[in-house]
Image (cartoon, rainbow, N blue to C red):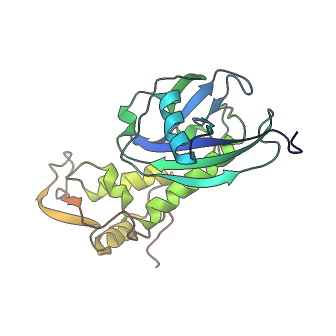
Amino acid sequence: MSDHPPFAVTVDLAVFTIHEGTLAVLLVRRGEDPFAGHWALPGGFVEIDEDAATAAWRELAEETGLERFSGHLEQLATYSRPDRDPRMRVVSVAHVAFAPGLARHVPTAGSDAAAARWWPVEDLGLDGADETSVELAFDHAEILRDALERVRSKIEYTTLAAQFVEEPFTLADLRRVYAAVWGAAPDLGNFRRKVLSTPGFVVATEDRDSGDGRSGRPALLYQRGPATALQPAMLRPDDTGAG
């Protein structure tokens, strides 16, 4: 007989996309105890013959119907507080993904999930400024806050934002991606300067936007540049041009 108490490993997934101009995350409503009726990250137990990544993709498909997608899925952190799960000692390997086009998938609840949907991040009160009636299971509010910070950092230091606009696009279109992720738009002048000075971020076309009927010259249209998603963009919502 083992001297060690029951112990399990789970995976939890924070999957983000931009839906109707707003940053959204995929959540499921738990159909079983513990925390029945609460909203939670998709996830579940790692089977004996699985690694964490395999379990993450399997649980995502089983609970939401979202199959493997081309966007990047990476490990976020390990959460191991002894009392995080009332059933037993459970350690979770959390994953995070941020990819365009996922909102075209209408989540279909399965396995032990009673419902699944895309939630606007701003409705979850993760920044602590707004009250919310959404009750999250386990320590998933903590995981979501960490995942949100990872996504904000990734879009700050890479050219990933360009994947979330349809070509051709204006700099205003691209700026709205940053506004959705950060909850505030970066300073316009400094945003233009940094985007245009980052090698390979965007490439100007010879065309201009048809305009919206307002006065002024139509905006120049751009395409995604050859830069990879790992090249620095160095943008923040509080950039005022002082740097």
Q: Dividing the image into 4 quarters, which one contains the N terminus?
A: top right
41 relative position to 163: left or right: right
Residue at 86 percent across and 42 percent down: it is: 2
Residue at 47 percent across and 78 percent down: it is: 242
Residue at 39 percent across and 52 percent down: it is: 177
Using the rendered image of the protein, determine whether residue 20 is visible from the camera's viewpoint: no
The image shows residue 138, relative to residue 95, as above or below, that is above
Percent x, y of residue 192: 32, 67
103 relative position to 29: left or right: left
Percent x, y of residue 53: 52, 47
Residue at 59 percent across and 37 percent down: it is: 41
Q: Residue furthest bottom?
A: 243
Q: Residue furthest front?
A: 1
Asked where in the image residue 205 lies, by quadrant, the reply is bottom left
Question: As rendered, which of 158 and 79 lies closer to the eye?
Answer: 79
Q: Residue furthest left?
A: 206
Percent x, y of residue 37: 67, 22
The image shows residue 237, relative to residue 80, as above or below, that is below
Using the rendered image of the protein, determine whether residue 31 is visible from the camera's viewpoint: yes
The image shows residue 96, relative to residue 25, as above or below, that is below
55 relative position to 159: left or right: right
